[in-house]
Amino acid sequence: MKNLNLNYIPVLPIACLLTATSPPVKAQQLPNVQTVGVLAPPQVKTDGKATEWGSKFEAYNKAASMYYTMANDNEKLYLTIQVADTAIIERIINSGITLTIKGDGKGGGSVPLIITYPLNNIQQIKVTGIKATPDSLISTTNNLGIEAAALSYQKKYTYELAISLKYLVPLINDIGTFNYNVMLNAATPSSFSGKYTLVIN
């Protein structure tokens, strides 16, 4: 992967706010797993709102009952999820969502990056696989380039996660591809996996 500026990592404030969102694209019109990389919109914020995305998503995973979009700019990877199922929302609030990023087996590193949010205390994120964080629990207001926010409004729950691309460098191949898994944590977890290639702007 070339021409990515990984040196400048701004820190944005985290908020957990209430906002209305317009209905997502109908599930039957979307693939079960996102198949293409997406360039994040300008001035994207990790604030629990899906407004920057036009409240549109790249996939609807039936197993997890989640609309989601994975996207990137030249600084961060973004994961935005929206859920309307009340039972799934309760599972997320109680047990969180875990994103695992792994190498694709063609030059990617072997130690995965694993991020879980929310926890019982929604002001914390659990992170493993980063040498800079010996304590795996970090605040949502941190200077590490990892951001998370979530909010619920009108029976919809929106989850947002942003990760500095510097943490992905050991896990991506020459064209910026990595494998990912999104798990809905619970006594009976459900998950889905895909492959993502960073979009070079």
Image (cartoon, rainbow, N blue to C red):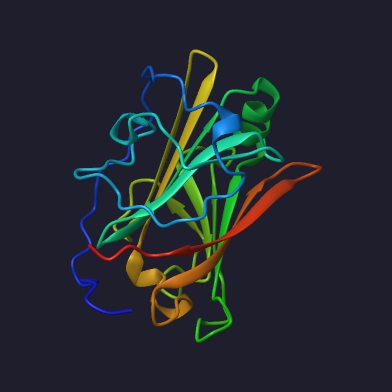
* Depth order, front residue of 173/150: 173
Residue farthest along the top direction in this orientation: 154
Q: Which quarter shows the N terminus?
A: bottom left
**Going 64% across and 23% down the picture, which residue do you hit?**
85
Q: Is residue 88 above or below residue 75?
A: above
**Going 27% across and 79% down the picture, which residue do you hit?**
2
* Depth order, front residue of 33/105: 33
* Depth order, front residue of 113/74: 74
What percent of the width, then of the height, locates residue 163? 38, 58
Across the whole image, how many numbered discs are drawn on residues?
A: 0
**Going 38% across and 17% down the picture, which residue do you hit?**
20
Q: Is residue 114 above or below residue 93?
A: below
Q: Is residue 116 above or below residue 144?
A: above
Q: Quadrant of residue 62?
A: top right
What percent of the width, then of the height, locates residue 74? 25, 62
Residue farthest along the right direction in this orientation: 188
Q: Is residue 33 left or right of residue 58?
A: right
Q: Quadrant of residue 37?
A: bottom left
Residue farthest along the front direction in this orientation: 29
Q: Which quarter shows the C terminus?
A: bottom left
Q: Is residue 111 left or right of residue 73?
A: right
What percent of the width, then of the height, locates residue 172? 45, 76
**Going 74% across and 41% down the picture, which residue do you hit?**
186
Q: Is residue 155 left or right of residue 132?
A: right
Q: Is residue 200 above or below residue 51?
A: below
What percent of the width, then of the height, locates residue 109? 52, 82
